[in-house]
Image: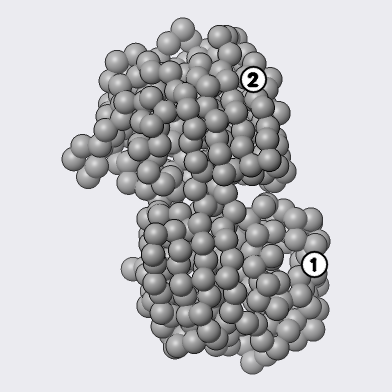
Amino acid sequence: MDKMIIQGGNRLQGDVRISGSKNAALPIVVSSLLVDGPCTYHNVPNLKDIESILLLLRDLGATVEKQGDTVHIDATGLNQFEASYELVRKMRASILVLGPLIARLKKARVSLPGGCAIGARPVNLHLKALSQLGVTIDIVHGYIEASVDKLKGNDVFFDMPTVTGTENLIMASVLAEGETILRNAAREPEIIALADVLNQMGADIGGAGSPIITIQGVPRLKPVTASIIPDRIETGTYMIASILTHGDVNITHCEPAHVGSLIHKLRLTGADITINDKSIRIKGPECIESTDIKTLPYPGFPTDMQAQFMVLMTIAKGQSIITETIFENRFIHVSELKRLGADITISSGNVAIVRGVDHLSGAPVMASDLRASACLVLAGLVAEGETMINRVYHLDRGYESIEKKMNSLGAKIQRAM
């Protein structure tokens, strides 16, 4: 199993290009299941999660070709309605095939998903909403078994905003009879990106990016050619890397509007941030100021940036309070940061009190999930001496060529078996 060895203490500077968004690419490539004919997507990141979803689409009968960052998918031959455990267990986002399979084939059998160990992310919100469109759902031997005679639009309220739940319902509703209204819908940029692609296919979706999304069902969709939006979490990770190392990094091919809450918090740490149309230049201050954060659904501070921000606070001046409201068990990385010398106390389960220290010290650590892996890479960049991260396969699920990009900025990172 791969390990990552980092020699800390190097200042990062230069340009780094942001890849396509994993969390936008996954539902968009899955939406190809709704269409007869070839769809083409550009700027698709080269990630393990993308490989997994494309493998699943092939298993369902779609033709898939990948050439660099371009993916061609033709689901004309869609002939399977079962997403097996062996394919779904690797990635929770595989649940996204549920809505399109029901819309296209009127039935689906999808294994309950696996994925990162960051707490319960139940699919009950998806299932409850789909049932309001007339879908009959049973859980049998670890599989979701769903069927419907005819999808019918309805007024659907989510008890809490759910990104994949919103995406699943949008994809099911575009071919439903009549109007579907999704209330308390997720507002993330990835939702807007999916709706934009579906509208290019001929769907009639309004309100994406707001809490109320309205979908007018259409009889059929047409193939599309589209490009994946930049990855806002990768953008944020390199922003923090620059500040941590007192660096000067120009982040290109990104979307500054998608990281507004992060930019606000990073400016409070003393960072010098210059925003251009599709780039962000960020210079780290001599002294990093402590800043509190609380994770919230978009447009609030993203839970996927909490671990990375915590690393920044470990060497900041003073004390900061980090409150996690989205996922339980998302402080697993704390024990590993403490191995590097961080001073962190967990209070009430979802609150971390971080007291800045003079420096971190390199040590062997273990990655537990995707964003925890990224936070340990960031910690390794500033820790004195050598940091060895075990189980870095998590990184390959969500960060394209992270060691190559970091090394191009002046980091010293290598992989080893």
Q: Residue 274: tell me if it is visible.
A: yes
**Residue at point 70%, 88% (across, down):** 219
Query: In front here: 350 or 227?
Result: 227
Kindly indicate whether the residue at mark 2 contacts the one at mark 1 (C-beta within 8 angstroms).
Answer: no
Amino acid under disc 2: Asp
Between residues 351 and 233, which one lies in front from this camera angle? 233
> Is 359 placed left or right of 386 in the picture?
right
Q: How many marks?
A: 2
Q: Position of residue 329 (x, y in %)?
A: 50, 40
> Disc 1 vs disc 2: which is toward the camera?
2
198 over 393 or under it: above or below = below
Q: Position of residue 118 (x, y in %)?
A: 48, 45
Residue farthest along the bottom direction in this orientation: 149
The quarter of the picture where the C terminus appears is: top left
x and y percent of residue 310 in the render? Answer: 53, 26
Query: Is 24 displayed left or right of 2 in the figure?
Result: right
Q: Residue 112 appears at what percent x and percent y?
A: 46, 67
Q: Which residue is mark 2?
A: 272
From the image, tell me which residue sits under label 1: 206
- Residue at point 33% right, 68% down? 86
Identity of the amino acid at label 1?
Answer: Gly
Query: Visible in this render: residue 295?
Result: no
Mark 1: secondary structure = strand
Circle nearer the N terminus (1, 2): 1
Q: CA distance from mark 1 to mark 2?
A: 37 Å
